[in-house]
């Protein structure tokens, strides 16, 4: 039985290994150029991601993969924009493929043919340009380095290397769950601020009543500590009553 041996991943370019002692290369055209392997030109206009295969340093095949755009992606992008988020796309795909996908999902700003290292550079570029926290959403191995350096890395799916580099994992693989996550995050952030205000208000009120001798010391302590905590917990429980709908704006 044939087995691949000495398999090596070449980040952003492809893989290399040996099959019964024969070298096999599978990856981008850039990888083939590095090994001085020349492929004949493909006749006609071919869109999609091209993956080249060479055996024993000779061209063997070209595989073309078309991206299937998630039907929910356009709705998600629109919802993000309406909520005030700036949305850009960075991808390792060729420009013509990136442009086609960007048009389908409604993204005006996109950057194509990027290596994992170049994606990291773009994250830093966005941070300096926008002067605000940057979130990165990705689902592939080549997204992992950029997810790790973003202020918020969000992995779609359960690819281990990607999940380990992220702060948040959407295991269902459904991009629309990003909207639910943001709704919950925003609601939780507001609740934390409300709770701080509630606790401070209760403590101040208890202290004033204590100074005015309207409450005994034990009551001031009880209300200021346990009382404020109970009120904050009750306010937090209101999160469970919120109906987080995908259709409603967040």
Image (spheres, grey):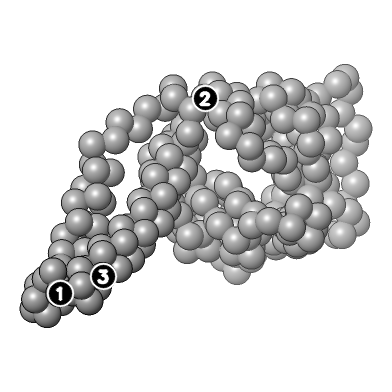
In the rendered view, would you say 226 is above or below 43? below
**Sequence-wise first label, 3 or 1:** 3
Up-down relation of residue 29 to residue 120 (above or below): above
Q: Position of residue 49 (x, y in %)?
A: 72, 35
Q: Residue at x 49, y 28 (%)?
A: 249
Name of the residue lying farthest toward the bottom: 217
Closer to us: 215 or 144? 215
Q: Answer with mark 2 or mark 1, whichever residue precedes in sequence.
A: 2
Q: Position of residue 219 (x, y in %)?
A: 9, 72
What secondary structure is marked by label 2? loop
Residue at numbered disc 3: 208
Q: Which residue is mark 1?
A: 213
Q: Which residue is mark 2?
A: 72
Residue 57 lies, in percent from the top left, at 81, 55
Q: Residues within 10 Å of mark 3 (few under 14, many from 20)?
A: some
Q: Looking at the rendering, which quadrant does residue 77 occupy?
A: top right
Q: Residues within 10 Å of mark 2 (few under 14, many from 20)?
A: few
Q: Residue at x 24, y 43 (%)?
A: 238
């Amino acid at each position: 039985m044939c087995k691949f041996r000495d398999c090596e991943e070449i980040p952003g370019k492809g893989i290399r290994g040996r099959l019964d002692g024969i070298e096999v290369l599978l990856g981008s055209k850039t990888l083939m150029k590095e090994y001085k392997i020349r492929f004949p030109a493909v006749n006609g206009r071919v869109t999609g991601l091209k993956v080249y295969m060479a055996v024993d340093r000779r061209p063997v095949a070209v595989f073309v993969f078309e991206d299937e755009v998630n039907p929910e992606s356009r709705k998600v992008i629109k919802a993000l924009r309406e909520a005030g988020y700036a949305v850009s796309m960075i991808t390792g795909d060729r420009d013509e493929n990136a442009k086609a996908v960007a048009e389908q999902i409604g993204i005006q700003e996109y950057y194509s043919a990027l290596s994992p290292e170049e994606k990291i550079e773009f994250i830093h570029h966005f941070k300096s340009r926008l002067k605000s926290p940057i979130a990165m959403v990705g689902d592939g191995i080549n997204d992992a380095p950029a997810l790790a350096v973003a202020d918020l890395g969000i992995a779609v799916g359960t690819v281990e290397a990607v999940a380990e580099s992220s702060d948040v994992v959407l295991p269902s693989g459904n991009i629309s769950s990003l909207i639910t996550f943001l709704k919950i995050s925003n609601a939780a952030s507001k609740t934390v601020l409300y709770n701080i205000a509630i606790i401070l208000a209760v403590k101040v009120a208890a202290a004033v009543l204590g100074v005015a001798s309207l409450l005994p010391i034990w009551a001031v302590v009880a209300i200021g500590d346990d009382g404020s905590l109970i009120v904050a917990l009750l306010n937090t429980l209101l999160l469970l009553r919120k109906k987080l709908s995908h259709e409603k704006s967040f």
